[in-house]
Amino acid sequence: MAPGSPPGPAIATMKLNERSLAFYATCDAPVDNAGFLYKKGGRHAAYHRRWFVLRGNMLFYFEDAASREPVGVIILEGCTVELVEAAEEFAFAVRFAGTRARTYVLAAESQDAMEGWVKALSRASFDYLRLVVRELEQQLAAVRGGGGMALPQPQPQSLPLPPSLPSALAPVPSLPSAPAPVPALPLPRRPSALPPKENGCAVWSTEATFRPGPEPPPPPPRRRASAPHGPLDMAPFARLHECYGQEIRALRGQWLSSRVQP
Amino acid sequence: MRYNEKELQALSRQPAEMAAELGMRGPKKGSVLKRRLVKLVVNFLFYFRTDEAEPVGALLLERCRVVREEPGTFSISFIEDPERKYHFECSSEEQCQEWMEALRRASYEFMRRSLIFYRNEIRKVTGKDPLEQFGISEEARFQLSGLQA
C-alpha cells in the first residue's frame, strides 16, 4: 500500500477503496487512452515498461496489457503535464506541486504517442471536465432561451487553464502551477472558458481551480455566477491570456523549426 | 495498489463542493457509527476525524450507488459489491437529500454523460458542435459511442 517511499516510522496510511478502484480500472467501459509507456522508478531508478490506462482522472498502470489488477494509479488532479529533457526519447512528466511532491517521468514509444498522452493527460482532470460541462450548460440555456441559432462565444474574461511550459523556457511568472488561491476572485466558481486549441508542444496544466468556502453547490452551479463581465475578472485574465499566447507562438515556432531536422 | 497518497491528501485540503459533520459507519459487520467530517472534492469523498487535518480515508465515487436507508440516512456502495455499504447519518432530511443528489452527480462518468448530452442538445438546436471551438471534438471520450448501454 505504500506509495514507494523508503521505509520510515510507521504512519497510518489513508484508507482508500482500492478494490473499487481496481474494478474501475478494469471494467468494460471504453478507456480514454491506453498504451505502453516507460515509467521511471524513482529519481535514480531505471525505467519500467508498463501498460497505462487512462480512465477519467485516474491513470492506472499494469504490469502488462493482460494483467487483471493495476500495479498502481496516479490521481490526476492538481498536476501539470510537461515535456522534459531526459535520457529517454519522447519523455514527459506529470508534476505535482508542493514540497517533496512526486514528479512522474514517463516516456512514450513515438512522437505521436507522446503527444497523444500529453494532450490526454493535461485534459484529464475532473476540474477541466467540469469547466466544459458548465460552459455547455450555459450555451444550451442561451440557445434555448435566447431563441437564436447563433452559438454564443465562450466568455473571454475567465482564465483558461494556464499552460505549463517545457523546462527549457523560463517559468511563467506569477501564475502558480499548483492549486493555490486565485486572488481577487469574488465568485465561488470562475465563469468558464476553455483554453484554445493546443499548439505544438505547449501543454496545459490540470490545475485544480480553487473554490473558497465549503458551501453546498446548487444544482445548476451556473446560477451562482454573477457579474461575469466585472472589470476585476476581465483585465488581468485577458492580459495573461495574451501573454501566454505570445509564449505559445514562440514555442510553436521553436518546435516546428526543431522538427525540420534530417 | 500504489497511489500518490500525498497528492490525494493535498486534494483533501482543497475547498469542497460539500462538507459536513455526519455520522459514518463502515461496511464491516459490527461497525460503529462515528462522527466524521465528510468532504466532497471532485470525485472523492474524504472523511476526517473531527479534530484532525489529515483524512482517515477517501472513497473514489465512480460506479457507486447512493441509496436511501432509514430516514435521514443514506449509503454508498459500489456496483461490484452492492451489499458492502458505507452508511451516513445526516442531521435532517434536507441534508440527506442534498448529499444524495450531490454524490450521484459527483462522478467523472456522470460528468462525461452530461457533456455528451449537452453537446448533442446544442447540436440539435444550432447544427454546430460546441466542442469544436475548444479543439476537443474528436476526443474519443466525448463520443456517443463511448456511452455504455
Image: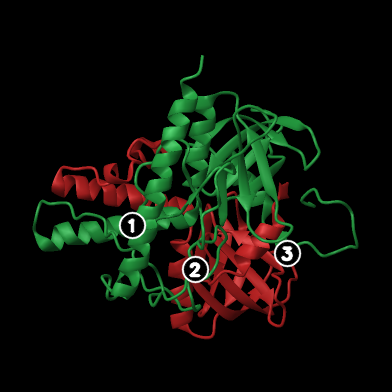
Q: Is residue A96 above or below residue A260?
A: below
Residue kind at label 3, given as amino acid type: Lys
Q: Is residue B105 visible?
A: yes
Q: A108 left or right of A257?
A: right
Determine the secondary structure under disc 3.
loop
**Residue B92 pos. (x, y %):** 49, 85
**Residue A230 pos. (x, y %):** 28, 74
Determine the secondary structure under disc 1.
loop
Q: A36 left or right of A214?
A: right
Mark 3: few, some, or many residues within 10 Å (few <14, many ≥20)?
few
- Which dot marks residue B28? 3
Residue kind at label 1, given as amino acid type: Ala
Spot the red chain and give its letter. B
Marks 3 & 1 on one chain: no
Q: Quadrant of residue B21?
A: bottom right
Residue kind at label 2, given as amino acid type: Phe
| Front position among marks 3 and 1 | 1
Q: Quadrant of the C terminus of chain B?
A: top left
Q: Residue at x 84, y 64 (%)?
A: A11
Spot the green chain and give its letter. A
Q: Is residue A163 above or below residue A147?
A: above
Q: Quadrant of residue B25?
A: bottom right
Residue at image mark 1: A193
